[in-house]
Each structure stands twice: as C-alpha cells, then as structure tokens.
Amino acid sequence: MIPLKDDNPTSRFPVVTVALIAVCVAVFIWQLNFPTDQKLDQVGFGHIDQSSLDYGAIPYRITHADDRDCAVGAVATSQGQFEAGVVCPGTRDYDQAVAIGQQNPDAKPIPINQAAWWVTLFTSMFMHGGFLHIAGNMLFLWVFGNNIEDRLGRLKFLIFYLLAGLIAVYTQALIDSSSTAPTIGASGAIAGVLGAYALLYPRARVLTLIFIIFFVTLVEIPALILLAIWFILQFIPALGQVAVETGGGEGVAYFAHVGGFVFGLAVAGVILTVGGRRDSERPPRLPVY
C-alpha cells in the first residue's frame, strides 16, 4: 500500500516538513558522492557505502557510549565461514578479527573513521540506503507530516521529529545492543509522525495505491486503518527479530519503527488530553494548497 494524499487540509504551508525533505535529499546526494575507501572493496565490504560506516548509528557504540573507532574485519558466520563485517573494540568479534589479521595480514581489520557516537544519533536519521528507501520515506513524510506540523507549530514539530528519531534509534539499540551493523534512515522519526497522525486524525481518508498480485487500484482508506496495518507490518517482524539472535546482523530496523510510532502515539495522547477534541471533530478549514 502506497499513500498518495489525504483529504486533511492545513491552514499554512508546511515549511519544516519541506525543509526536512530537502535536507534528506541533499544528504542522499552527498552520500552518492561520498568517497569510498578502496581497502574496503578488497575485503568484500564494498556493498555498504562508506558514509554509512562513518556516520551511521551503531547500536553497540550507542549502548556503550564508546567513541573508539570500529573496524571492518573478518567475522565468523553461523556456517563456520568468515566474511567481512563491522567489529568494535570490546566485542568478541573484534578480538577474533584481530587474531585472524595477525595470522593473515591481508585480513587485518581496517579502521573506520567514525563520527562521535552521539553525533551519529542525528546524522543517521537523515541518511538513506537507496533510492526506494528515500522515496518511500519522503512520500510518507509529505503526506502525513504537514498536518502534524500544522497542529504542533513549526518549532515544536521540528523538536518532535528529532525526538522521535532519537527514541527510534535508542529503541533499536537497546533491543539489539550487541549489533555492530550501521543503522541509517528517517523511518523512525517518520514513524513518530505516523503515530501522532493515527491518533489525531483517525477519520481522515488517505488515497492509497494498492497492489494485489497483478491487480492495481486506488482506494480511499481511513487513516486509522491504513496506519494500523502499517504498524502491524512493522511489529510482527520486530517480534521475529527478538526470537532470533540478531547481534551484528543487517536488515530493517523494525524496532526503530515501533519505538517511533509509540512515541508519536504518546505525544498525540498528551495533545488530546490537554487540547481536547481531535482535529477531525473540529469545523473544516479551507486548504492553502
């Protein structure tokens, strides 16, 4: 399901939402032009871009507040083989990679020039792993972010967005504290926007593009149903990540999505408690665009 637009008008132009989209796009262009350490290609780690290694949020560094640089080295797999992976000082994988490097100079760990761990909390939430990743995130931010900005106000919305991103990063890090895989993406912060929207505008209707095998159609779906389905599709895989050992692995950070969404629900709950009715119950306003 791909949301295209909602029927929920705003009273002013969403300056912050547009600015966030512009920053994410600019950072993505910067990522595409980020120089790659040729040594990483030699050890088979070229499939992860250098920018993610340097500025992505690594759960192990976050949970240990560690500013020591990690490295790319040989990591044992479940099949008993070795492959290139991120290893951080203080972990068993790091000691193993150093030992392998002593036996085979060609497999010596290659240091990564990483930003401070607390800096990566912010840089990671503006980075993306590919065109589909950033396109999907920016579409969701555009469709749902303007109304939350309109409700909170520009400065409060910016603070809310950044806090949602931080909550998302920490949720994933605490669930998988031994992971050394760099985490990037605005999904956690945007999940906070979705959580707030679900509670503040449950009756808003969202024009959605639906794919069912070879069947494609446009349907207007109530926001509460659409976002509830989205949350379920994040929560079930997140439970699967808990059921298996995920330390050091790669993939979608589902718990970041869950953490951001729950934070958005909590903030919206406070708004409703203090401010009263949902906007969907207020008199309609004329749209500005």
Image (cartoon, rainbow, N blue to C red):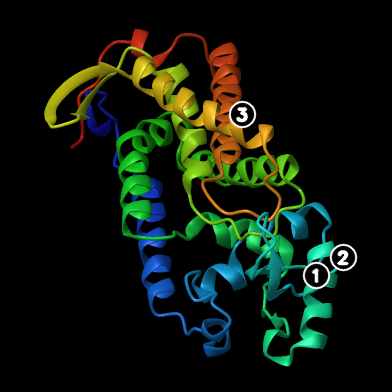
Considering depth in this image, is 244 or 168 the residue closer to the camera?
244
Write the residue at 30% across / 44% down.
139
Quarter of the image for the N terminus: give it: top left
Write the residue at 41% across / 61% down.
23
Quarter of the image for the C terminus: give it: top left
Pointer 2 with pointer 1, Cβ within 8 A:
yes
Q: Name the side, left or right, on which 82 lies relative to 207.
A: right
Q: Position of residue 126 (x, y in %)?
A: 49, 58
- Classify 106 as above or below 158: below
Q: Position of residue 35 (x, y in %)?
A: 47, 85
According to the picture, the residue beneath numbered tag 1 turns out to be 94
What is the C-alpha distance between the residues marked 1 and 3? 28 Å
Q: Amino acid at mark 1?
A: Tyr
Q: Which mark is residue 239?
A: 3
Q: Which mark is residue 249?
A: none
Q: Which mark is residue 90?
A: 2
Q: Position of residue 200 (x, y in %)?
A: 44, 18
Classify mark 1: residues with Cα within 10 Å, few (<14), some (14-19) or many (20+).
many
Which of the 4 quarters of the picture holds residue 130?
A: bottom left
Secondary element at image label 2: loop
Q: Name the side, left or right, on which 243 lies relative to 254.
A: right
Q: Amino acid at mark 2?
A: Gly
Considering depth in this image, is 195 or 152 the residue closer to the camera?
195
Of callouts 1 and 3, the N-terminal one: 1
- Classify 256 as above or below 26: above
Write the residue at 13% across / 32% down.
214
Please tell me whether mark 2 or mark 1 is closer to you in this view.
1
What is the C-alpha distance between the residues marked 2 and 1? 7 Å
Of callouts 3 and 2, the N-terminal one: 2
What is the C-alpha distance between the residues marked 3 and 2? 28 Å
